[in-house]
Amino acid sequence: MGVPVDTATFRAAMARFPGAVTIVTTAGAGARRGITATAVCSVSADPPSLLVCLNRATGTCAMVADTGMFNVSLLAGDGGATALRFAGAGGVTGDDKFALGDWRTDARGLPLLADAVANFCCEVAEQVQAGSHTVFIGHIVGITLTDAAPLVYERARFHRLAPI
Ligand SMILES: Cc1cc2nc3c(=O)[nH]c(=O)nc-3n(C[C@H](O)[C@H](O)[C@H](O)COP(=O)(O)O)c2cc1C
């Protein structure tokens, strides 16, 4: 066992985990919501499913809980500005975040990022309250793919992948 863990130590350790940078989005009643998220993980191939962890203080979390639907757009290596915008940089909030990027709409009316490495269209199958966050497990009902390389976040910086 190590020493008792405070929040700063937890954050310093988790910052060393490289995370693929995504935008988690949803839409309802004519409004779109989205946030930058690295807490995204594969769950199961049968049925195809993934999980996202969303802070309950965000409008995106509330709207995903309401609509029961969300999309996950995996950003390409040039997506740093989009990641910052959807993380709230510059005070941009709500639907205004979508002014940056080539956002399309899926058959359900949810946002899809045209040049994303991958878009995962999900329906909420389960949700679990965990501390400050809600964990949404989504069944994947559609996928789009490109061959771009993804954007990675580690120790508070964005990185592009380089093969060894
Ligand atoms: C690289 C990065 C990864 C993030 N990952 C998550 C995440 O997985 N879950 C989450 O709830 N917030 C995450 N955030 C924070 C949210 O993006 C941020 O709180 C949110 O965009 C605030 O939006 P709002 O001002 O519209 O509420 C992350 C931020 C950054 C910069």
Image: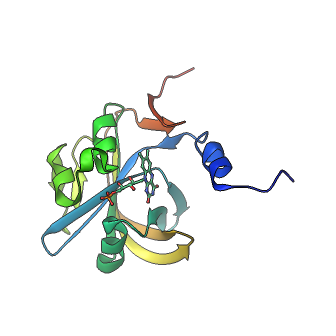
Horizontal placement of 138 versus 110: left or right? right
Residue 62 versus residue 10 in the image, above or below:
below
- In which quarter of the view is residue 146 placed? top left
Residue 116 visible in the shown view: no
In the image, residue 107 lies at what x, y percent?
18, 65
- In which quarter of the view is residue 130 placed? bottom right
Residue drawn at the location 36% of the way across and 32% of the way down: 77
Query: Looking at the image, which residue sits at the far right?
Result: 1
In the image, residue 48 lies at what x, y percent?
46, 64
Residue 20 versus residue 59 in the image, above or below:
above
- Quadrant assignment for the N terminus: bottom right
Quarter of the picture for ligand 1? bottom left
Residue drawn at the location 34% of the way across and 74% of the way down: 62
Horizontal placement of 64 versus 97: left or right? right
In the image, residue 51 lies at what x, y percent?
49, 63
Residue drawn at the location 22% of the way across and 58% of the way down: 111
Horizontal placement of 147 versus 91: left or right? right
Residue drawn at the location 53% of the way across and 36% of the way down: 154
The scheme the figure's colours follow is rainbow
- Quadrant assignment for the C terminus: top right
From the viewer's side, name the closer residue of 156 and 141.
Answer: 156
In the image, residue 123 lies at what x, y percent?
36, 72
Residue 19 visible in the shown view: yes
